Image (cartoon, grey):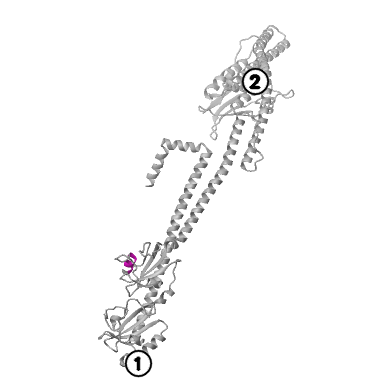
Amino acid sequence: MVVRSVVAVADASSVPVFGRLVDAIRASYRRKLATALFVVLLISAAATAGLYVQSGAVLGESVERSMTTAATAEANELTEWTGQNRLVARLLSEHPVHGTGDDAQVRAYLRTQRAAREETHLVDAYVIDRRNQTVETSASRSLEGTRVADLPWDERFAFRNFDDVRMTNPYETANGSVAIGFITPIRAKPGHLLVVAVDAAGLFDRFEHPVDGGFTRVVDSNGTVVLADDPSAALEQYHDEPFRAPAVRSGLRGETGFTESPGYGTGDGTAYVAAYAPVEGTDWVVVEHAPASSAYAVVDRIRGWIFVIGLVAGVGLVAVVAVLGADVTGALSALSRRAERLAAGEYDVEFDTDRPDEFGDLNRTLATTRNTLSRRIEELNETKAALETSNVALEERSTMVSVLNRVLRHNVRNDVNIIAGRASLAAERTNDETLREELDVIRETALDLAAISDRTRRIANLLAEDHAEPRPIPLAEELPSALDGIVAATKEEATAVDDGQPATPAADGPTVVIDVDSDAVAEGPATLPLAVADVVEELLEHNDEAVRIEVTATRDPDDGAVVLRIDDDGDGLPALDVQAVGQGEETPLQHGKGLAVWCLEWTVNTTGGELRLDTDRATVEVRLPSAS
């Protein structure tokens, strides 16, 4: 059943109309509030209705229990009363005076018992001779000689034994009260019966009615009201119909219960409810009556209060939600409009910052945000103007740098090459050793300027967008090709030249060992291998001709970075170059001889890598991000 319910809800949510309704509610705070109010009112109404019904049922059951308890208690009282009177009749019939045969003594005894009995009110006591069907002796002498047929009660004298006691029908006495006779055989005087007449008028003085206006009727099997707390109702028929009332029928079967239609009316049109209980040892049924309006008066009052409380709570809830909802939705609408104006760029929007509640806090926050945005926009406009001015200056300087770069690359390099060539030619044509040495110095200086020009061109390429974009660089493939040309050129320069004789290779030239792992693929600009080659070239130039340089590249197993190391067994890089790069600037008092280390520093920085220089160990270490 649970699974079916869940599926049913899911199917309902997929219905287009239901989905549109949910979307419409979600799109508006007012609709959400109205929906929540409707749900709360529905739950409150259901709870009030449940309480209304439940309280009525509980209180109704309480009324039924109280009336049934009263009817049972009254039936028990009658059972006790009849039992007590049966015992009195037996005690009087067992007295020895009945065996004397002296009517005067019997009469005196009966009179004495009638006057002395306090536990019961004896109306009369007399002895009946069953043979001639007359009253033989009586406490009231006027009854003596009266025929049984003339007595106000009717009884078939059928007894099982001498201990048996029979009750007569209630009858009206001479003084207008109701009496009941208890008849029992006299053991000492066979053929005679003792009749003890007991007044039943005060019996109902001991009964209490649980409901105002209640009354009690005791009905026998013939449907006659044998006893009543209203004397005028005694000895009348309980039910006008020829058959017994349902409550009487159920009581005669030994049942105890409650009925909302007892079938008894007083003629005033009042509706009654009743509880009934049988009287043991008799054919009587006690029926406790109460007006329905009185019996359920508490129920009606409580139900009325529940209805009033529920109505007041509902009206109060609607009023509170209406007031708060109007305030909240109004504040939200105003905030929404102001926020939209703020988003549209209207920074002169006024917010309700004087409001003391949470909406005031929100207004103050938005006002602060507005002021902050205004300041930031002013700052951005100022920065924009400054950047525009700076861009103009940068464009002018960039043009100047481009012109100087072309001059440096073409004019200066060509002139330097001419100077170096002419110095070499002049040195070959002179025999003056001093002049030749000076010419060699001029030639070396010119070649150094040419190398600086080349490195400057590579730096320009590095700064250009075409070469600055990082890309995967397989170092195992690109490093050897970049280093081979430098090693070959260095070996050629180290070849001995003497007196115009043919050049011969030097006995011990420089050695460059390259050991790069195949998985060492770094992320960097295209000029990275050339920058490494420049550093190696500077090491070759700074050290003697037999220097050994090792270039290795591996991957760090901890973070996966590519680690490239340049070690040499010579003096390493010039200390001034290392210090200049470490401080981040060239100064007149401390500057590098070349641009190789600067070029490598800038190249590594474009990749987000790290350059470490160790002058003591003559080590250059570069950590580069690995290509994904």
Q: What residue sits 62% from the left and 42% below the top?
A: 358
In terms of depth relative to the viewer, which is nearer, 364 or 304?
304
Judge whether residue 84 can be spotted in this image: no
Query: Is 419 one of the magenta-colored residues?
Result: no
Looking at the image, residue 567 sits to the left or right of residue 83; the answer is right
* 625 over 1 or under it: above or below: above
Labels 2 and 1: the sequence-earlier one: 1
CA distance separating discs 2 and 1: 169 Å
Q: What residue sits 42% from the left and 35% below the top?
A: 16
The percent coordinates of residue 91 (x first, y second) are: 35, 85
* Residue ranking furthest to the left: 131
Tell me the kind of residue under disc 1.
Answer: Gln
In terms of depth relative to the viewer, which is nearer, 193 or 341?
193
Q: Residues within 10 Å of mark 2 (few under 14, many from 20)?
A: few
The residue at which mark 1 appears reads as 105
The quadrant holding residue 272 is: bottom left
The residue at which mark 2 appears reads as 541
* 233 over 560 or under it: above or below: below
The quadrant holding residue 133 is: bottom left
The quadrant holding residue 585 is: top right
Tell me where the magenta segment starts and ends, as one range. Answer: 246-251
